[in-house]
C-alpha cells in the first residue's frame, strides 16, 4: 500500500486541528469543506489507520494521529520558518505572530505596541489568544506569551513589556460611599461590598494591601464576582455603585480626574512587578524578533 503522504495534505490536517474543524479550516485555506474532508480521508487511507475521531460536535486525534502530528508539526513549522526567513532577507518581514496573553494587558499595554508593529510590518498577521492561566505556550502553537510574575521554564527568556511596576488601587463611586461611608482602615473593608475576580476554575484574586512594608490580606463582602477574563469590565459596575474594586491604578486615572470614582485607602495601595514577554530560548522567527525589538525600544513611565 502506498503510504507516502504529501506535505500539502499534512498542512490541511494541521489546519483542521488549529482551526477547530473542517469548515473553519476550509475558510482559512480558501477551499471547499469537501476538499478538506477528502484530504483527511486520503491521509487515513494512505496510512491505513484513522487519524481523527469525528462526531457531529467535536473531533479528536486518535493515538496514531497524535503521534503523526507530534512528529510532523515541528517539521512543517521549520519549513515555513525557513521560507519566511528567505523572504525576510529581502527586508520585508512577513509571516505570523501568535501571542498568548492575560486579559490585563489587552486594554492599555498591547494596543500601542501592536499599532507600531503593524505600522512597521504590515505583512505580518498577528493573532492574540487571551488566557490568564499559565499554559504550555509552545503546545498552544504560540510564538511568545505575556504573564505577570509567573515562574517560567528554564528554556524561556523574558523581558519587561509595559510598565516595570504597576500599582493596585482601590476605588468606589461617590454614590456608593455616600450610602456606605468611606473605609478608613483596611479592616473596614470587611463590611463593604466588593467587585472581585476569579481565576478560571480557581480561587478569587486576593485583595492584598501594603503600607511601609506591612502586607495584609482583607476579605470584603462579595457583591459581584467576574471571570478574570473580563478584568477590564469591572469598572462599569463600580461606576454604577455596586461596590469597591481593586484594579490597576493607571486604569483609574480618568475616573479619578472626572470624579466618577473616588480613591479608597490610597496609603495602602501595593505595587507589583509589571508584565513580561517570554519566549523560547532558541532562535526566534523574524516576526517575533521584530516584536521584541519594539518592546525593548519602547519607553514607559514606571
Image (spheres, rainbow, N blue to C red):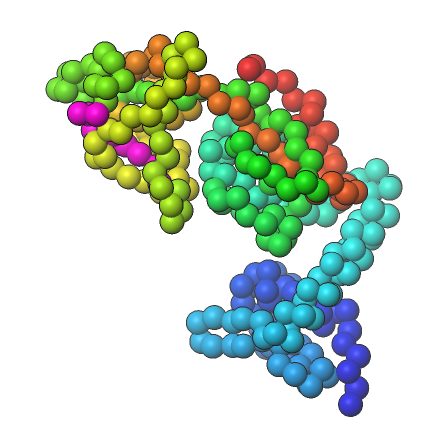
Report the front residue among 186 and 231: 186
Q: Taking 136 as reference, is 148 above or below it? A: above
Determine whether, in the image, residue 184 is placed left or right of residue 18.
left
Q: Quadrant of the N terminus?
A: bottom right
Tell me where the magenta segment starts and ends, as one range. Answer: 190-198
Residue positioned 73% across, 35% down in the render:
290
In this figure, what is the number of numbered marks? 0
Q: Position of residue 96 (x, y in %)?
A: 68, 47
Residue positioned 59% across, 53% down in the render:
140
Residue positioned 69% across, 35% down in the render:
157
- Look at the image and say whether residue 55 sits in the magenta stretch: no
Q: Taking 81 as reference, is 240 above or below it? A: above
Q: Quadrant of the C terminus?
A: top right
Report the front residue among 283 and 12: 283
Q: Is residue 7 visible?
A: yes
Q: Taking 3 as reference, is 22 above or below it? A: above
Q: Position of residue 289 (x, y in %)?
A: 74, 36
Residue positioned 79% across, 42% down in the render:
283
State the predominant SS element of the stretch in magenta. Answer: strand
Q: Position of residue 274 (x, y in %)?
A: 54, 25
Residue farthest toward the bottom in the current orientation of the protein: 1
In the rendered image, which quarter is residue 189 located in?
A: top left
Q: Is residue 115 visible?
A: no
Q: Position of residue 185 (x, y in %)?
A: 25, 13
- Look at the image and say whether residue 196 sits in the magenta stretch: yes
Residue farthest toward the left in the current orientation of the protein: 179
Amino acid at each position: 500500500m502506498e503510504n507516502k503522504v504529501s506535505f500539502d495534505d499534512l498542512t490541511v490536517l494541521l489546519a483542521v486541528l488549529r482551526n477547530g474543524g473542517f469548515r473553519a479550516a476550509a475558510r482559512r485555506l480558501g477551499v471547499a469543506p469537501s476538499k478538506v474532508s477528502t484530504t483527511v480521508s486520503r491521509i487515513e487511507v494512505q496510512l491505513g489507520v484513522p487519524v481523527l475521531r469525528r462526531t457531529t460536535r467535536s473531533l479528536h486525534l486518535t493515538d496514531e494521529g497524535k503521534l503523526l502530528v507530534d512528529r510532523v508539526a515541528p517539521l512543517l513549522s521549520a519549513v515555513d520558518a525557513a521560507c519566511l526567513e528567505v523572504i525576510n532577507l529581502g527586508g520585508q518581514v512577513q509571516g505570523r505572530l501568535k501571542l498568548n496573553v492575560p486579559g490585563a494587558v489587552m486594554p492599555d499595554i498591547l494596543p500601542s505596541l501592536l499599532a507600531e508593529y503593524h505600522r512597521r510590518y504590515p505583512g505580518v498577521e498577528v493573532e492574540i489568544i487571551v488566557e490568564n492561566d499559565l499554559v504550555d505556550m509552545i503546545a498552544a502553537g504560540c510564538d511568545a506569551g505575556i504573564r505577570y510574575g509567573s515562574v517560567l521554564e528554564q528554556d524561556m527568556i523574558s523581558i519587561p513589556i509595559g510598565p516595570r511596576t504597576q500599582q493596585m488601587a482601590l476605588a468606589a463611586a461617590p454614590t456608593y460611599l455616600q450610602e456606605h461611608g468611606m473605609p478608613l482602615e483596611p479592616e473596614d473593608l470587611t463590611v463593604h461590598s466588593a467587585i472581585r475576580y476569579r481565576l478560571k476554575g480557581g480561587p478569587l484574586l486576593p485583595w492584598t494591601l501594603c503600607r511601609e512594608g506591612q502586607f495584609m490580606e482583607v476579605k470584603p463582602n462579595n457583591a459581584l464576582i467576574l471571570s478574570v477574563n473580563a478584568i477590564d469590565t469591572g469598572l462599569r459596575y463600580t461606576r454604577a455603585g455596586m461596590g469597591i474594586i481593586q484594579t490597576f491604578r493607571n486604569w483609574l486615572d480618568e475616573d479619578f480626574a472626572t470624579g466618577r470614582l473616588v480613591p479608597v485607602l490610597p496609603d495602602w495601595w501595593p505595587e507589583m512587578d509589571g508584565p513580561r514577554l517570554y519566549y523560547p530560548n532558541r532562535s526566534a522567527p523574524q516576526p517575533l524578533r521584530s516584536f521584541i525589538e519594539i518592546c525593548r525600544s519602547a519607553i514607559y513611565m514606571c
